[in-house]
Image (cartoon, grey):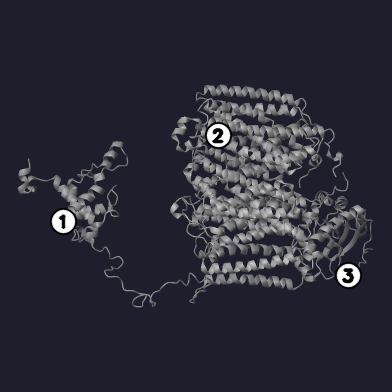
Amino acid sequence: MSASSDNELPPGEKVRLGPLGPQVVRVAGAIGVIFLIATVILGLTNGDHMRRFFHSYLIGFTYFVTLGLGALFFILLHHITRTKWGVTSRRIAECITGVFPLLFVLSFVLLLPLLLGHESFYSWSNHDFVAHHEAMEHKTAWLNAPFFALRVVLYFGVWMALSRYFFKKSVGQDASGDPAASDQMRRAAGPALFAFGLTLNFFAWDVLMSLEPEWYSTMYGVYFFGGCGVMFYAALALSSMGLRRRGIAAKSITVEHYHDMGKMLFAFIFFWAYIAFSQFMLIWYGNIPEETAYYNVRIMTDWKWISLALLFLHWMIPFTFLLSRHTKRRLPLLALFSVWMLVMHWVDVYWLVMPAYSPGGMAFSVMDITATLGIGGLAVATVAKLASGVDIIPTKDPLLGESLRFENM
Amino acid sequence: MSEHNQTNPPADGPLWGLLAEVSTPTELVSAAAKVRAAGYTQWDCYSPFPVHGIDRAMGTKPTILPVLVFMGGITGTGLAILMQWWMNAVDWPWIVSGKPYFSLPANIPIAFELTILLASLTAFFGMWALNKLPQVWHPLFRSDRFAKVTNNGFFLAIQADDDKFDREATEALLKEAGATAIEAVHLDADPKKKKMPRQIPAFIAITAVAALVPFACIAKARTSKSSEPHYHIIPDMDFQPKAQAQQASALLPDGRVDQMPVEGTVARGELKADDHFYRGIVDGAWATTFPEQVPPSKESIERGHQRFNIYCSPCHGLSGYGNGMVAQRAEKIGSPNWTVPSNLHQEYIIRQPHGQIFNTISNGIRNMPSYGAQIPEADRWAIVMYVRALQRSQHATVADVPPTLRQTLR
Amino acid sequence: MDTAIDKDETPQKSTAAAVFQRVTETVSGVVERRTWPKAWYIAFAISCCLVVLLGISLWHLFFTGIGIWGTNNTEGWGWAIVNFVFWVGIGHAGTLISAILFLMRQTWRTSINRSAEAMTIFAVMCAGIFPLIHVGRPWVVYWMFPLPYDMDIWPQFRSPLMWDVFAVSTYFTVSLLFWYMGMVPDLGTFRDRAKSKIKAVVFGVLSFGWRGSAKQWHRYERAYLLLAALATPLVLSVHSVVSFDFAVSQQPGWHTPIFPPYFVAGAIYSGFGMVLTLLVPARYLFGLGDIIKKSHIEAMCKVLLLTGSLVAFSYMTEFFIAWYSGNPYEGFTFFNRVFGPFQWAWGIMAFCNVVVPHFFWFKKCRTNPWIIMGLVLLVNVGMWFERFIIIVSSLTREFVPATWDYFVPTFWDAATFLGTIGMFLFLFLLFLRYLPMIAMSEVKAATPEAHADHHGTH
């Protein structure tokens, strides 16, 4: 029933970044390079064999991996369910997944020293540590530098292949207008979701959980996934609003779409809290020393302030505000909570990584911020570069019309 | 005009309003917009399902239900936390699996469930209350045409008590708004006429009263006393297969359940009546002699020697100078909580009666714990005997050595 | 006619009315039909027999004690708790379909949500029986509620079993409210179609005098949305709480943080399995093919594929971490599941939950009713065995080898379980017979004709 006239963008809609693209690439790229250099200098002068640098860098690195994974999840989910509202914002997600090649290159900063025998990054790579911890002996079959590096390369390989496939196919449809491309993507999304779930889970175990190699939790990957969702939907809402201010895609991504982004952000905040609570409560209740060690660091030292901040600022306050449809439909408020959640998600990653570095208590360093800004600058520049060459809306998607006319109840 | 309907009951009551039918949801929306634009207030639309866009066309204000539900939810959370705190930490504090009385993580699940429960109850009952339902009778139900409203009919009704209501003008407006049919709806002629069959309220009332009967019985049972035996609903705990006092029993030799006590049985509380042996007291003072159960003998002293080396020497030392291995180590590491064990050769201990030393072993003194649970009474007396021998050995004179052996001394 | 105006009805407009009329006729027709399919009577007779069997089992249990079951000191939970978890799991699809799919605007849910909700309620009733009779003295089961009874003590709220009491009873209440509220407009339809006075009065009272006013619809829709939003986390919480029963312990194979989401995925999997088990035959028996479309059945098969994969993913996670942790007890538990005495049960579970859902990748398996029936029956079996493996294989191989044992169910275990299946079917068949099994008003609202912009205002 959808005539072709139904499926077109509103007249006068701007779908190209135009001069905005190179502008962002220049500024963000410069920020990235400067801050990364600053981080390296700070790390070298810190005199701890780059241990601090490694942890700070890992925070920034993981933070943007969660962004890319959230975007990939969004694409797969929307293909598999043929969701209508997300069509207009899908291209933004597709551009965001362009961050994976960059992150792959950046991962060498972690992998090369490990492969070259640098022992101060992950404690499982330290022979002394392994020799003195009985449980570790058994784990070296899994946690050893070559196998670890191989796995990380494999994860990024899968992610780059998936994001490349969906980006190409989707952009290709802009040119060809072939509705069959949608079907192909939908069919590919099922198996892709399998690969996505497995790689995400193992990535979380390998790169983050192994920071405290004696501890383990079956829930860890799920928790990490909750963070990916929070990160991505906040970033999606913010980037769409940023484009809207420049008049790009302003008529296609309407308040109805923002409302749904807000709902998804809300849902992931809730999901994150559900998973975080379940993991904490079960370990607290079971009270088995080898498991409680993890929370012991995070609750009995002054890390508890960060834990409490997560409880109130990552869950309770944004959750309560986002319950109301008014918060989700008023763009300044939604922008506020999107920024809020981006910050809190960073704190969450910080809380995952840093206690491994200083289990005795909080130890803040400028490097933590500069590393994230550095990687972030490069990530934004990469995404903007990719987005400059394409339309910001998938203009020929067969569901575009329905997405444009979409209204919430 | 439209009054000559054959199917409706006679329209003999006052006019309630005009009911107009339109044929599609789209027309209902446009008709509603027209009626609203004309300035009516007492009117409503009726449809088999919620029509998209009708709220905007009618200018319906958003309901306050979400706010009520939010309050309901908060109440649920608060009540749940308060209940668990009061019941488990205040009124009936009880340690379980090493958790604090008030353990918030363990209270979250119930707090969550009650939040949802109260919010849902608010949503459900709040919605019906705001909608003024149940209201089983309504003048609209007098119209046969209106039965289509739950099937495929779309209606718009303007009430006669609207300020702007005017029979002719309103009808004209409805016609113009696209009505396919218009009919007048009247109230019942007799305003007091009950539309509900009288049996229904009666049935409800009887059921309600009957439902209270069990509660009344429970209330009575809880507040009154009775000499009658109670009902045995589930008999397995009340009638257990066991023998009871004064019964006959074929199993037992003399045919009685009650048996004579075994030879040598002592009455409760009378087992340890011997103060001398069990407490080291004779006539209210420390015993200065050994009880008859443990007469002084070489065997007793040797037994005491062995027990002393096991139980006492770790602190008091093998020769009783208070320099056992534990004491030496405590001194070496400078333990701040250590009370130095007594040297048993001090004057005041030598002068203590046997009974007092026995008491010290039984109940402990200062930091020395009680050994009553570990060393049987006879062994304790044997230890006392050995301690006496030890003390004597450290204050011996030549006179103490038997004359025949004095030669062997240097 | 009795009206002042009789406009020409354009064919297009009559189509809209006819579409709604057809929905009403099809759904009401199921209840109003004179003769019922023979299959209904046969199924009803069988279910009645099983209900009698349930009654006998419970009678025998109450007057003899739970020694009639295969439970023993080593295996204290046995079939009772296996069945409890199984039925609660079944009860998840209903509210999921009603609430979560509603929030996700999946309109295909309208054809199945009513019967799925009914199924939820009946399944939760079956589930509720088991912990109740498993306590040994069911007549004092009110001790589990915070009532000021004569012993003057309170329930111990730090126990996950108490959480269960609250979770399951809340779930039952909310599901019932949700189900009933959704049914009110349809009960109004039954009232207006009633041929006899008694029916009209009964349905009139049951429908609360519903008259479809736009202002009422407005609040009704908002309340429905709110209930859906509340039921969604509730669904997650119920099976999470059930999983807490296991996971707060220190038992290897039970104490693992992934249990909550893993149980929820399993519950949805088994619930959808049961929905299909009941609806695929009902669709053919009552000629509901127009409303429960092929695409709806396909969509449900895809949900099975997704949730089945999540379950398999959780198995993999458990196995991997059991090895990775280096904890010998954890490692042994999982080794024992695969190679121990309950190897056969593990094999059934693994086949039904890991392999079977992957048949749904093929379109033929999603469209052929016979294949679907075969596969979903396997899904039900697989999910029962999953709970069996979790409970029985862990308890019969505890820390201390001296307590090791093997579990053998008795006749009464099986009789009680079959009895609850009978009760479930019995209630479901009565529901089909007397209540609107499809949400008419929602199906109508989901048709293209219902949308104001359908006839070319755009």
Mark 2–mark 3 distance (CA, rounded to whole Å):
81 Å
**Quick one: quadrant of the N terminus of chain C?**
bottom right
Q: Are marks 2 and 3 in contact (CB under 8 Å)?
A: no
The foreground one among A139 and A211 is A139
Indicate the secondary structure of the residue bearing disc 3: loop
Indicate the secondary structure of the residue bearing disc 1: loop
Check disc 1: other Cα within 10 Å, few if <14, some if 14-19, many if 20+: some
Which residue in the protein does label 2 denote? A353
Q: Which quarter of the figure has residue A277? A: top right
- Report the chain holding disc 1: B
Q: Residue at x 72, y 71 (%)?
A: B201
Check disc 2: other Cα within 10 Å, few if <14, some if 14-19, many if 20+: many
Find residue A167 and report its horizontal and vertical position in percent. 73, 33
Name the mark on residue A291.
none
Camera sees residue C219: no
Q: Amino acid at mark 1?
A: Pro
- Report the chain holding disc 2: A
Name the mark on residue B10.
3
Q: Name the mark nearer the viewer: 3 or 1.
A: 1
